[in-house]
Amino acid sequence: MSLANECGTDTPELAARRVWRRPFLKWAGGKYHQLPDIDRLIPAGLRLIEPFVGGGSVFINSDKHSSFLLADVNADLIHLYQMLAVAPDAVLRHARLLFGSLNSAEGYAAVADEFNAQLLGGPERAAAFLYLNRHCFNGLIRYNLAGKFNVGWGKYPNPYFPEKEIEAFTALAHNCVFMIAGYRRTLSLASEGDVVYCDPPYEPLPGTNGFTNYAPGGFNWDDQVALAECCVAAHQRGAAVVISNSSAPRITELYAQHGFTLHHVRARRSISSKSSTRETANDIVAVLGGMNSGK
């Protein structure tokens, strides 16, 4: 039996031809361009759990799960998702106003100041976060030590308003539970019939500096180890687990020690501001349960 048939997914050829939905947010480390490789390694199940949902490329494209538990430590991200689930028209109305009249350095600074002042109502704050994400430099989400959003204006001439992508999101939102939570709490909820997909901050490759400070406290090696251990515990309770990460030697060793099957996928790095320095590298997709495949 082929890997695709075991997983109940498309063959690699069909996956490559499939039309994948784009997420409505720009997100550093997003998995949109790796979906043909990642989706086929995620088994079917009753519920998909993502402790690091980020921009949501994976869940928004899932046709193998009937419900979703989507978590992240970024409260602004989860707030936006929750507001779009319950009041999409209000969020879109406010967002259109911001996109339509404030694409300038001054307008961007004004929105960022209001956002950081914590005085906006629910839909307005969600719309401001969407605006900042689409107008800031490279779509980066970064906060200073005081918890203030501090990414500069991206100077884009006409930032795209992702209305079509938001409509696809809201059509699926009634099947989702959104939660502000770390990976330990989220993974403690995984049990029989669940499928877990983890996309943590990547372990830096030797000799490089990784982007691991997307939230206060960052994500260090102790977190990588704890995440693997929490995933093993979830698997022991009956969940299948899939993790994406870099191919750093100690990551591959860590996952191999815990019994994961390792798959290599190609990825184009996109944090650099210069396209000439955006490199292609091998990533790891580690699988525990749900299939009996080789590397």
Image (cartoon, helix red, strand yellow):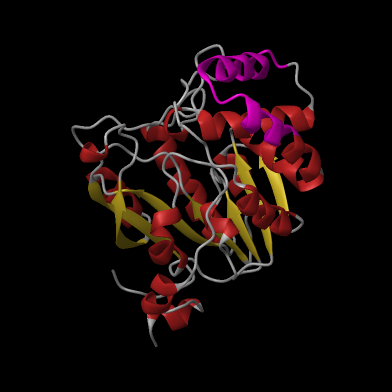
In the figure, is residue 77 to the left or right of 16? right
Q: Residue 70 in the image: x percent, y percent?
A: 63, 48
Q: Residue furthest bottom?
A: 1
Quarter of the view holding residue 55: top right
Quarter of the view holding residue 237: bottom right
> Does residue 8 lie above or below 132 as drawn?
below
* Chain part drawn in magenta: 94-118
Toward the viewer: 69 or 92? Answer: 92
> Does residue 292 lie above or below 190 as drawn?
below
In the figure, is residue 118 to the left or right of 229? right
Q: Residue 139 in the image: x percent, y percent?
A: 47, 34
The residue shown at (31%, 56%) is 256
Residue 80 in sight in this render: yes
> Does residue 252 lie above or below 54 as drawn?
below
Q: Residue 278 in the image: x percent, y percent?
A: 26, 41
Q: In which quadrant of the rendered image does the C terminus lie? A: bottom left
